[in-house]
Structures are given as structure tokens and as C-alpha cells.
Image: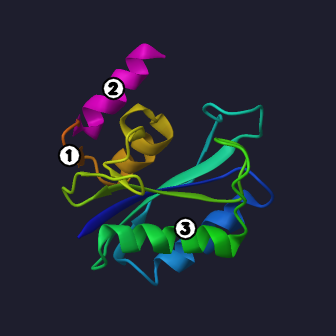
């Protein structure tokens, strides 16, 4: 199943953190495509340094919840600490879309409920998959154009 994962880091060696996460994703996803890294301003949360963001797309045979657990494990391995909501982080891996699955559980929400509002997700995703769609929301090119108009 096609998995879309956003990556972000704004602490220490941001590029290295993303590189390590991608190397770990290669163990879980096949046909992995990764966008170029982009620097973005933080959205929400406390004052903090800029992020380095990317999007990875690949095929996966795990159940969605098991893929989420693997992403959380990669974050833990890199040293992610969860103390401030939307605060600075060594690594952030979010499962954005998993095939056309729609899941609304306390543990996992698919598609990611904020992805359609986040240029740092949509722009790198569009660069590597311009025909992508967020199930139940719309084409990412339309969503990205909508964000551009409002800024």
C-alpha cells in the first residue's frame, strides 16, 4: 500500500536527522521516493528554530497501525522527546496518507487531519507526486494553490 510520510527536524544536525530517518524508512518501505529537503518556519507551538522538512513515499505491506508504530520507533531511536506540543524536535515522522484508508481512532487518524493545511507537507509531496490526492479532501495541487492564495 502507498504510504506518504512527512519528515521534519529543527534540532541539532537537521539534515543528519532526516538522513537517518530515511535510512530507517528504507528498511520498511519499498520503491522509496524522497523529496528534496526544504527549510520552513515552525507552525504553532513555542518560538523555535526553522525546520528542515521532506516527504517520503513508498510501498508498505504493514497494517497502518503497525507502520505508525514503526515510525514512532524510528523517532525514539533518533532521540525524539515529547515534552511540548508542537515544540522543537530532533525528528518528526507523520503518516499522512496510507492508500485510500480513512481511520479515526484515538491512536491513528488517516488521512492526517492537518496535512491539507500544511505547505511544508504539500509542497515537497507535490514535487515528487504531482497527481496525489488526499482521500476525502482533494488533489494536493488544488490544496497547495489554496494555501498560496491565503498567504
Spatial separation of the CA atoms under disc 1 and disc 2? 18 Å
Q: Are marks 1 and 3 in contact (CB under 8 Å)?
A: no
Image coordinates for residue 117, horizontal then vertical, percent = 41, 31
In the image: residue 133, left or right of residue 92: left
Residue that lies at the very extreme toward the top in this rendered image: 150
Based on the picture, tell me whether residue 147 belongs to the magenta stretch: yes
In this picture, which residue range is highlighted in magenta? 138-151
User: In the image, which disc is placed on residue 135?
Assistant: 1
Vertical placement of 121 versus 96: above or below?
A: above
Name the mark nearer the viewer: 1 or 2: 1
The secondary structure type at the circle numbered 1 is: loop
Q: Which residue is mark 3?
A: 72
Real-space Cα separation, disc 2 to disc 3, in angstroms = 31 Å
Q: Nearer the viewer, residue 12 or 31?
A: 12
Q: Assess disc 2: are there few (<14), some (14-19) or many (≥20) residues with their C-alpha within 10 Å of its C-alpha.
A: few
Callout 3: helix, strand or loop? helix
User: Do residues under tags 2 and 3 come within 8 Å of each other at their CB atoms?
Assistant: no
Q: Quadrant of the N terminus?
A: bottom left
In x, y percent, where is residue 48?
77, 37
- First in sequence, mark 1 or 2: give its number: 1
Amino acid at each position: 500500500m502507498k504510504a506518504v510520510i512527512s519528515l521534519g527536524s529543527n534540532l541539532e544536525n537537521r539534515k543528519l536527522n532526516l538522513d537517518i530517518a530515511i535510512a530507517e524508512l528504507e528498511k520498511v518501505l519499498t520503491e522509496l521516493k524522497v523529496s528534496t529537503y526544504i527549510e520552513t518556519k515552525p507552525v504553532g507551538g513555542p518560538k523555535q528554530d526553522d525546520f528542515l522538512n521532506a516527504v517520503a513515499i513508498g510501498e508498505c505491506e504493514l497494517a497502518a497501525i503497525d507502520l505508525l508504530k514503526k515510525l514512532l520507533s524510528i523517532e525514539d531511536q533518533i532521540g525524539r522527546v515529547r515534552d511540548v506540543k508542537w515544540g522543537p524536535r530532533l525528528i518528526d515522522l507523520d503518516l499522512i496518507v496510507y492508500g485510500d484508508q480513512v481511520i479515526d481512532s484515538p491512536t491513528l487518524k488517516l488521512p492526517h487531519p492537518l496535512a491539507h493545511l500544511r505547505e511544508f507537507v504539500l509542497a515537497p509531496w507535490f514535487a515528487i507526486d504531482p497527481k496525489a490526492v488526499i482521500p476525502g479532501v482533494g488533489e494536493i495541487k488544488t490544496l497547495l494553490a489554496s494555501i498560496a492564495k491565503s498567504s
